[in-house]
Image (cartoon, grey):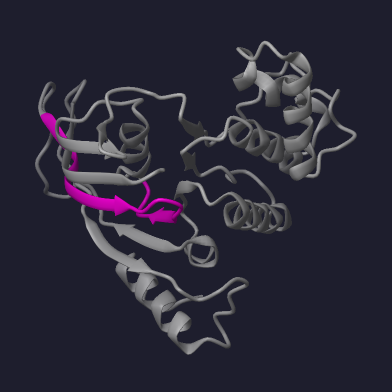
């Protein structure tokens, strides 16, 4: 299970310092509330891969942290399978934007972190090895993170997330900093993993084509204070070809337009 329901979600921050007026707009006084998320209504179905797009600074990561229980909301509600989110849960895994592997642990030790409570060491080691094999890191079990490429580190993080069989995976721009070819390979990894495990995945990205390639749904957010501008389901099978599928190509153009780009490059 992994059904997420967000209703009338608002998030305000208090300004820590005053700012000067810019471009004839009003300045901001210290302690004044800054509205980041404004009446967000969103649902993520069980087993769905939802890609969230939006301008830089609009509040995408803030939304994700609230959904995962790492940040508090100002008002509204966030529920997962009918239960209010009031803090992080071991049933939901967060994959951070930057490398989250512990540098003093090997690949096998990093992947097995979430299984520390298992008393059956043989069963634990077998499960860890199974997921290392799934992400094609066999032979690197005893390597440390600094001995891996960026793509291999991401795959180790993916194995660490999946090994605990989470209901939901929250991914905050997990491919940031990867080179183009590695990024394409990691997109393929996520698509394959998702089709195999069918876990609910909420995936934050700035890359429109990445979202269109991977997502079962694409959600486009506005400038801050963020609202949902576009919420569309993608039914085209993988792999997706924007050039040969006119409907997919038009939808891609619509997403570009919603984000203020008037021609799709």
Residue 265 in the image, given as x and y percentages of width and height:
51, 75
Query: Which residue occupies the extreme right position in the image?
Result: 139
**Side of 239 where 3 appears, left or right:** left
Q: Is residue 46 magenta?
A: yes
**Side of 76 where 124 appears, left or right:** right
Foreground residue, 258 or 118? 118
Q: Is residue 223 magenta?
A: no
Residue 93 in the image, given as x and y percentages of width and height:
49, 32
| Image quadrant occupied by the N terminus | top left
Query: Above or below — where is 97 with respect to 108?
Result: below
Foreground residue, 95 or 124? 124
Q: How many marks?
A: 0
Residue 167 in the image, given as x and y percentages of width and height:
46, 38
Residue at figure coordinates x 79%, y 31% from the top left: 129
- The quarter of the displayed image where residue 176 is located: top right
Foreground residue, 230 or 215? 215
**Side of 156 where 6 appears, left or right:** left
Residue at figure coordinates x 80%, y 33% from the top left: 148
Stretch of the chain drawn in magenta: 33-56
Foreground residue, 223 or 110? 110
Residue at figure coordinates x 52%, y 86% from the top left: 245
Q: Overall secondary structure of the magenta stretch?
A: strand
Residue 263 in the image, given as x and y percentages of width and height:
42, 79
Query: Above or below — where is 183 with respect to 174?
Result: below
């Amino acid at each position: 299970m992994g059904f997420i329901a967000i209703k009338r979600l608002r998030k305000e921050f208090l300004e820590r310092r005053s700012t000067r007026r810019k471009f004839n707009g009003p300045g901001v006084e210290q302690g004044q509330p800054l509205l980041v998320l404004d009446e967000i209504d969103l649902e993520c179905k069980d087993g769905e891969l939802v890609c969230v797009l939006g301008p830089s600074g609009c509040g995408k990561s803030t939304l994700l942290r609230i959904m995962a229980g790492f940040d508090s909301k100002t008002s509204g509600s966030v529920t997962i399978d009918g239960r209010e989110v009031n803090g992080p849960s071991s049933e939901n895994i967060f994959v951070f934007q930057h490398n989250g592997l512990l540098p003093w642990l090997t690949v096998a030790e990093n992947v097995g972190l979430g299984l520390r409570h298992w008393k059956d060491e043989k069963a634990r080691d077998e499960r860890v090895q199974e997921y290392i094999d799934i992400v094609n890191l066999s032979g690197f079990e005893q390597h440390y993170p600094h001995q891996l490429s960026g793509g291999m580190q991401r795959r180790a993080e993916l194995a660490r997330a999946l090994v605990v069989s989470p209901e939901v995976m929250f991914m905050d721009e997990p491919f940031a900093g990867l080179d183009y070819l590695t990024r394409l390979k990691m997109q393929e990894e996520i698509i394959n993993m998702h089709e195999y495990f069918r876990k609910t995945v909420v995936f934050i990205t700035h890359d429109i084509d990445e979202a269109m390639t991977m997502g079962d749904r694409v959600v486009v957010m506005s400038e801050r204070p963020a609202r949902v501008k576009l919420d569309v389901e993608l039914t085209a099978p993988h792999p997706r070809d924007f050039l040969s599928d006119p409907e997919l190509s038009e939808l891609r153009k619509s997403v570009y337009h919603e984000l203020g780009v008037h021609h799709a490059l």
